[in-house]
Amino acid sequence: MNRSNIKVSFCLLVATLGLLITPRMVFAQAPGDKAYISSNNGRGYFPLAVKGKVVPIYTADTDYPGVMIASKSLQADIRKVTTDSALLLTGNIAQTKNLILIGTLGKNELIDRLVSEKKLNVSNIKGKWEAHITQVINNPFPGVKQALVIVGSDKRGTIYGIYDLSTQIGVSPWYWWADVPVKQQQNLYVIPGRYVDGGPAVKYRGIFINDEAPSFSGWAKEKFGGVNHLVYTKMFELILRLKGNYLWPAMWGNAFNDDDKLDPMLADEYGVVMGTSHHEPMDRAQQEWKRYGSGPWNYETNADTLRSFWRKGIEHMDNKETIVTVGMRGDGDKPMTDGSNISLLEKIVADQRSIIADVTHKDASQTPQMWALYKEVQDYYDKGMRVPDDVTLLLCDDNWGNIRKLPKLNEPARKGGYGIYYHFDYVGDPRNYKWLNTNPISKTWEQMHLAYEYDAKQVWIVNVGDLKPMEFPISFFLDYAWSPDKWPASRLDEYTRQWAAQQFGNTHAAEIADILTTYTKYNGRRKPEQLDQNTYSLTNYREFERVVNDYNQLEVKARRLYNALPQQYKDAYYQLVLHPVEACANLNELYFDAAKNKLYAAQGRAATNLMATDVKELFKKDSAISHYYDKIMANGKWDHMMDQTHIGYTYWQEPRANKMPAVQNIQLSAQPQMGIAIEGSELWWPQQQSKAILPGFYPGCEGHYIEVFNRGQGDFNFTATSSSPYITIAPQKGSVSLQQRIWINVNWAKAPKGVTDVPITISGLDNSKIIIHAIVNNVLLLNGTGFNENNGYVSIEAAHYNKAVNSANIKWEVIPDYGRTLSGVMPAPVTAKAQVPGGNSPHLEYVVNMVDTGWVSVKTYISPTLDFTNSNGLHFAISIDNEKPQIININADESTKAWSKDVSDNIKIMESKFHITKSGAHVLKYWMVNPAVVLQKIVIDSGTERPSYLGPPESYYH
């Protein structure tokens, strides 16, 4: 090897090592995208900005207006990052060493020239929907050394390419809507390569601003004078930065096309496809009918007026990109009259399409249309109503995140395809949920994965309420719609980490992701608006206490990170991470203390009045938290966004004002009086004459508590003793003014085999004594395989199976952090054929070690998935040992009452009965019958399981 070759090789080695060891500040537009920006130079790198010099940006006057708008955004974004400005130019290229060239195929002469000269290969994107390429090209034009070329297949393809670069240099899509700061960097280089994004999996992807009073509407009125183009241009930009393309605008008291004539014009210029909600046909808002309509909203009696009203909607639409809603519901998003029939509805659609064809001067099939099968409209479809094949059928969830209907796998494809209308926010039965984000992305993934696999991918639109505080699930919904294959269930944790890194950098991303996942799991158990002092059990399994402690610990973690972050990140972190944790931890504790106040009053505890005071303080704190979000955070930028009431619901509709839970104050005797309470009971001693028996003690399980409490003023001393050397008591003595918890545990190394009743003596005032019984059950081995029964139950988390039996085409898949407690498990693929359970068909096995014999109830906790096949329900099967599997239909009860309970509890609990003939090890088998049934938990109840919301905590298992 000669010297020159050695020198070249050495330089290449140094450059390569530099790439490996030099840190680069990179962000990707959507989590999972390949990063191509570096803050350090390298071989062939394109110098976007170096030491105060930024390359110029070239585009063309002949391109779409939205491309110019996005190019100006890029210009501003570069200035945010580098503090230096890039020139934005059109026309011929002046002599410049390096430049950014932006354009759409067929709309930019310079781009087309590069293609014709074979310097730019666009075969990956040509003719595709919303695709783009970002590529560094050397010597593209005379006198130009390098050009960073962003080329789109169409206008949004180009726009997405522009905003991808913005995010890559460090500008979050949420920079304005969530105040995510821009990290400044002086030097920006583009790593050479060809970065192709071949377009979305779902054609139309968007959000619906809905139920916008009082929060969104109050905020918009204060900050912008109303819901007008000043608000919507911010929203258009956000949607495009998130690679969405579709919007249903606010419609309760608002009319997008009528309130501000700039609204529709600017939507088209920005490049956002507009629509109207599921019950507002022909591009006209409900409010427009209230303003300009006459007579009843009834096609049988007022058809001419309605046709004239609808015609004006299509005339005003002109050539602007729109998906036209067709069909008709009753006025105000209500069902039509009982007399409405299918033939009338089909005539309505036919007449609407005639209007579309007449106004646009082209066949109606050339204008995108959508018919929403929302609520009772789906019943019309199921009874035989049909619309032309080019109309997209927008299928819907049940307003609670469970899809009602999907296409049959063997159905012929529709030209207009199928879409999904989904909810992150809702007003209606069984309860409004509008206040905070309650949408774990694992649940969104599970349902939208189902939709995609069943070919509902023409339109995905999600109701996001006020937009804030749904930032994280909005990002996921749109990212997943763009590329479902990129985000299988196994990568959801990674998505959350990368999203957190996009907003806050890599240092704390893993911890922030854990907080986001955990708080949405907690909120997803039951909507905050549905919580009260009776939701969780105060006495059984320490359930309420565990829930509150878990949330408070999460708040401590979130607050610690808040304190550690640089000042410029605090506003963004508060609204995206800390606020929902702080607000919901406070709300849960409020109801916990209200529950304790009620119990303590019944027991005459001295702590009763303290709990009443705590409830009042926590209620005040709730207002203070909202006040900080509205008035202090970000200097009051988001004032009114937390105006939504959320405490004191009595039926589905929100209260006019938050109402504190009722509390009691009691009069205490002048002298102290000792009372005793035990875990698992609302009773107290010595009032009760029955034995005081603690929940049983089993190897591997937690201890239990006794509470010594005062029923009067002053204080008294107590002692707690046991003659058994293997019982531990802490503390063994003390002084009580309010109450003292005593923990009882077992030293299992010393405990005798079998079942032992151990008395524990509590001595107090005037040498009074109360005996508490601890039942020590040392029958099952700690080192045995499987789950051990304790206190009459075995509780099993679905993901903790001992064995998963797959088939050639069906595998069991864990959905991490799914459901109310741990994770979900389902068979994959979701399009698999139904199975006959038995033998080696797909099933999960759980080894259980039973103490009791006789009849047991197996309670299977299943996600509240609806029968989207609209056939005879979705099924699974259960068996124990070699018994014949019992097949269970999870949709057997489709009554409104059952549905209301299922969605409120966010679970279905299906029971089956089995007879256990002998104690010891058994194998419980959970069998696949239909796909898309998600298992969360199994509880075997031997007859003494106690009531709780989440079910007993998981049993000891080995």
Image: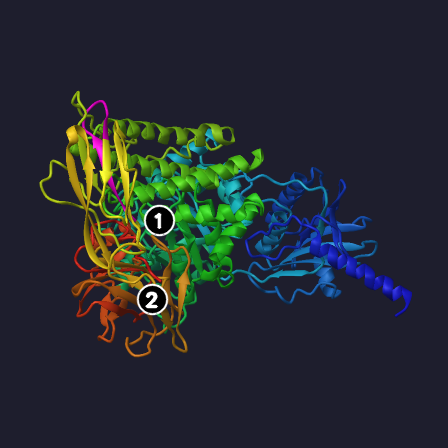
Task: Find the distance from the CA under tag 2 to the CA under tag 1.
Answer: 33 Å
Callout 2, which amino acid? Thr
Query: Where's the N terminus, which quadrant?
Result: bottom right
Q: Which mark is residue 209?
A: none
Q: Is residue 266 left or right of residue 544?
A: right
- The overriding secondary structure of the stretch rendered in magenta is strand
**Residue 315 location (% of width, % of height):** 45, 49
Question: How far from the left and from the top, in percent, is residue 536?
Answer: 26, 44
The reply to whether discs 2 and 1 touch (Cβ–Cβ < 8 Å) is no
Q: Secondary structure at mark 1?
A: helix
Q: Position of residue 214 (x, y in %)?
A: 37, 34
Going by the picture, which residue comes out furthest to the right?
3
The residue nearer to you, when weighing 557 against 920, is 920
Q: Does the image show residue 659?
A: yes
Residue 258 in magenta? no
**Rendered position, 370 above or below 255:** below
Taking 314 as reference, is 117 left or right? right
| Residue carrying label 2 | 785
Q: Nearer the viewer, mark 2 or mark 1?
A: 2
Would residue 713 be counted in the magenta stretch? yes
Q: Nearer the viewer, residue 529 or 877?
A: 877
Disc 2 on helix, strand or loop? Answer: loop
Residue 580 visible in the current orientation: no
Q: Amino acid at mark 1?
A: Gly
Q: Is residue 206 left or right of residue 57?
A: left
Which region is colored magenta?
703-717
Near mark 2 (Cα within 10 A), the count class, few <14, some 14-19 or many ≥20, is: some
Q: Which residue is mark 1?
A: 524
* Mark 1 residue crowding within 10 angstroms, few (<14) / some (14–19) / many (20+): many
